[in-house]
């Protein structure tokens, strides 16, 4: 974004107080992330109201976007306030304007599992031929993604965005802002079902992006996911399918090398190449396939994917492998968890050599599906690991009980209340050449366990 405070006030129909000429270079809703030149957007939160932080924010930020009737002190002489009826609506209007004003192509990644990894893979593949901007981390919702858009370098020509949602309607808002030329779906699965009546509700919500896809663009769907079967009928865009033997983009001759990664032949519409991926798990090969299919819509060839793939790394806490003392291997997938993602990682653990230790935290936001989902994970764990550490409260106990009923002995099933207790247990119990999987929902905090065992700082 390259605007003055006065220009912002005109765009959003706001009342300006302070220095109209102050220049704005980006935007942020989190006062802890502010940089010089940012616009701080004051929004009410679940615990605190952003208006409480306006005065402190203006020590760094150039201006603040606030409610018209908020009791906020006048800004310093070199700062500005823009007062509006609805700061969130104004913030979204600024993001829509930025998207219209820039000559970007937009590539959007959505789905239920693998979004962030696939988004990062796609950005890396496109960077060989394009000036790339990308949304950071998991900044994929109606609060974080507009900030990413408004803070991009003006020289970007392709913006790669991850679009996520927790409730119906969110993706419609993001679709109107993004208006992508390419829309990629990873696999759709039961997540956030606390906010949806069933999986069909999740599928409908994910479809909210489809009306905003450019009719001259490309829809990339996972042909191995029946939840996406109806999506091509909802757009006039070109459709590119990946994931099955009959798809235009597919994997052939996959060799699973355990923690060393995979080798396979990548087939794209315009060619094929042998690929080596140094990240463990067939799911990571599927993530790369999805990204490669989407990149091919921008002219990236299979040979280019093969050149880039060996240097790709999983995002932090999303499948990174650490090799510790005593030849202990640790797979850190502690960022989040869903039933499908749990099953994928347990399948990876099952193929590992050595004693297999699963440290599994509870899965949040599953609503009525929670009890059965945790029971299913416990049963899966019984066939995939030699030691289970279930972390959390009642749902952790359900996992542990299911694992016991499925055949694990009481001596190797442990229930602990928190990540710190899991850390202490592992320090006592780990043996040389163990393979440890750490996975759970973000709120469980298992990144602290990973940090303690690896000596890395928790994110």
Image: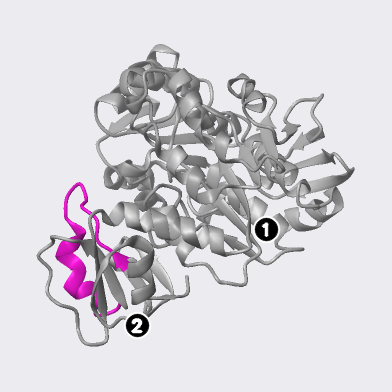
Magenta-span inclusion, residue 237: no
Residue 407 location, quadrant? top left
Question: In the figure, 166 relative to 2: above or below?
Answer: above
Is residue 259 rendered to the left or right of residue 57? right
How far is disc 2 from disc 1 in space, using C-alphas? Answer: 35 Å
Quadrant of the rendering where the C terminus is positioned: bottom left
Is residue 82 rendered to the left or right of residue 290? left
Q: Position of residue 293 (x, y in %)?
A: 74, 42
Instruction: Name the residue carrying label 1.
Output: 124
Label 2 SS: loop
Is residue 54 rendered to the left or right of residue 333? left
Residue furthest toward the left?
A: 71
Residue furthest toward the top?
A: 405
Q: Earlier in the sequence, mark 2 or mark 1?
A: 2
- Residue that appears at 54% across and 53% down: 315
Q: Position of residue 283 (x, y in %)?
A: 63, 36
Q: Residues within 10 Å of mark 2 (few under 14, many from 20)?
A: some
Q: Position of residue 181 (x, y in %)?
A: 66, 47
Q: Where does the magenta region start and end?
A: 40-61
Instruction: Name the residue carrying label 2.
Output: 22
Mark 2 touches mark 1? (CB < 8 Å) = no
- Residue that appears at 89% across and 43% down: 270
């Amino acid at each position: 974004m390259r605007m003055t405070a006065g220009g912002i006030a005109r765009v959003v129909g706001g009342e300006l107080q302070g220095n109209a000429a102050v220049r704005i270079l980006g935007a942020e809703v989190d006062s802890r992330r502010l940089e010089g030149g940012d616009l701080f957007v004051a929004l009410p939160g679940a615990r605190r109201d952003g208006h409480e932080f306006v005065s402190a924010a203006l020590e760094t930020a150039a201006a603040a976007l606030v409610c018209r009737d908020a009791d906020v002190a006048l800004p310093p002489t070199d700062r500005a306030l823009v007062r509006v009826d609805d700061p969130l609506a104004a913030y979204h209007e600024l993001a829509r304007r930025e998207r219209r004003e820039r000559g970007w192509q937009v590539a959007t990644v959505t789905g239920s599992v693998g979004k962030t990894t696939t988004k990062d893979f796609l950005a890396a593949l496109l960077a060989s031929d394009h000036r790339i901007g990308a949304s950071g981390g998991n900044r994929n919702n109606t609060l974080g993604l507009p900030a990413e858009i408004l803070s991009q370098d003006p020289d970007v020509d392709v913006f790669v965005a991850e679009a996520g949602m927790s409730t119906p309607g969110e993706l419609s808002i993001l679709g109107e802002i993004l208006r992508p030329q390419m829309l990629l779906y990873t696999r759709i699965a039961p997540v956030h079902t606390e906010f949806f009546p069933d999986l069909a509700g999740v599928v409908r919500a994910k479809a909210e992006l489809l009306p905003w896809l450019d009719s001259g663009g490309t829809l990339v769907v996972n042909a191995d996911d029946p939840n996406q079967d109806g999506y091509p009928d909802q757009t006039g865009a070109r459709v590119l399918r990946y994931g099955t033997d009959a798809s235009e983009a597919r994997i052939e001759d996959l060799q699973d090398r355990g923690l060393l990664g995979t080798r396979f032949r990548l087939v794209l519409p315009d060619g094929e190449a042998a690929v080596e991926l140094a990240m463990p798990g067939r799911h990571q090969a599927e993530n790369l396939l999805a990204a490669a299919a989407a990149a091919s819509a921008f002219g990236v060839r299979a040979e280019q994917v093969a050149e880039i793939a060996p240097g790709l790394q999983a995002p932090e806490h999303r499948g990174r492998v650490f090799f510790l003392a005593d030849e202990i291997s640790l797979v850190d997938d502690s960022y989040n968890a869903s039933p499908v993602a749990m099953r994928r990682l347990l399948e990876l653990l099952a193929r590992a050599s050595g004693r297999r230790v699963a440290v599994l935290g509870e899965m949040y936001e599953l609503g009525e599906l929670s009890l059965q989902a945790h029971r299913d994970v416990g049963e899966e764990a019984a066939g995939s690991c030699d030691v289970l550490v279930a972390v959390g409260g009642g749902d952790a106990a359900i996992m542990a009980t299911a694992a016991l009923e499925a055949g694990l002995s009481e001596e190797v099933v442990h229930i602990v209340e928190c990540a710190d207790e899991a850390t202490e247990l592992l320090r006592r119990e780990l043996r040389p050449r163990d393979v440890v999987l750490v996975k759970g929902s973000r709120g469980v905090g298992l990144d602290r366990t990973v940090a303690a065992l690896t000596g890395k700082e928790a994110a």
